[in-house]
Image: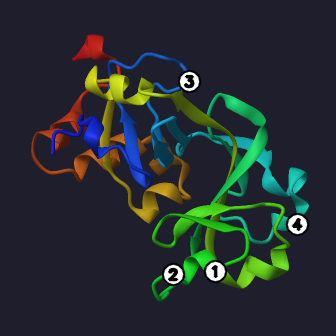
Amino acid sequence: MTGADPDDLAAGMLLVAAPTLLDGNFSGTVVLLLDVNADGALGVVLNRPGTLPVGHVLEAWREVVSEPAVLFEGGPVEQQGALAVTLLRGPWSAGEESAQPGFREVVGRLGLLDLDTPVELVAGAIGRLRVFAGYAGWGRGQLQREVTEGSWYVVPALAEDVFLADEDHLVDLPRRVLARQPGDLAQHSTRPLDPELN
């Protein structure tokens, strides 16, 4: 796996910003893809925790959200809105996840949770929950072009990538994700963030 194949783009995959990606919205980020289709792609930045506690804006979810219990900066699009990514408790039989109220599967037990769903209906099913202010979005063919140009590495996600609690690990998430990849891709984890220092 080279990590830069547009054919790998799918919901549940990670985008790791290459050192050459200098856009301030995405430099040094890891993005979880939530939806990829012919019209474009949507995801959330995993490693930019904010400072506003979730309980200050979404009181009902205060006891359910995972640590750190703050709104994460999900991306530059619709920053006044919130997306909730959840990992349901398991194990589940096939198709059972989709029966959970307000849950839309991304991959397996990982999915989006509608924050308008009454907490009491879903609290027992939630294993982990993270809330993102805004999201990252790409139009038709845009993300494929960026991957082909080498701006992103495309790699499989693990639940621990999505729900890291330690701030130091969040900062280091791009390196941690690349270091576990096979072949040449792991070598990218040792490159400096500033390509001029390479």
Q: Which residue is mark 4?
A: 60
Instruction: Work out whether residue 150 or residue 37 is closer to the camera in this orientation and state it.
Output: 37
Q: Earlier in the sequence, mark 4 or mark 2?
A: 4
Q: Which residue is mark 3?
A: 25
Q: Is residue 25 above or below residue 38?
A: above
Q: Secondary structure at mark 4?
A: helix
For the C terminus, which image quadrant?
top left
Q: Earlier in the sequence, mark 4 or mark 1?
A: 4
Q: Mark 2 and 1 residues: CB-CB less than 8 Å, in contact? A: yes
- Image quadrant where residue 118 sits: bottom right
Q: Give the image location of residue 3, x and y in percent.
A: 23, 40
**In percent of the image, x 31 and y 41: which residue is there?**
154
Within 10 Å of disc 3 (Cα), the crowding (few <14, some 14-19, many 20+) is: some
Q: Give the image location of residue 38, x and y in percent.
A: 45, 38
**In percent of the image, x 33 and y 18: which residue is there?**
20
Within 10 Å of disc 2 (Cα), the crowding (few <14, some 14-19, many 20+) is: few
Within 10 Å of disc 4 (Cα), the crowding (few <14, some 14-19, many 20+) is: some
Q: Which residue is mark 1?
A: 99
Q: CA distance from mark 2 to mark 1?
A: 7 Å
Q: CA distance from mark 3 to mark 1?
A: 35 Å
Instruction: Work out whether residue 35 or residue 119 is closer to the camera in this orientation and state it.
Output: 35
Q: Give the image location of residue 123, x and y in percent.
A: 74, 79
Dot 3 amino acid type: Asn
Q: Which residue is mark 2?
A: 95
Dot 2 amino acid type: Gly
**In percent of the image, x 44 and y 52: which residue is there?**
11
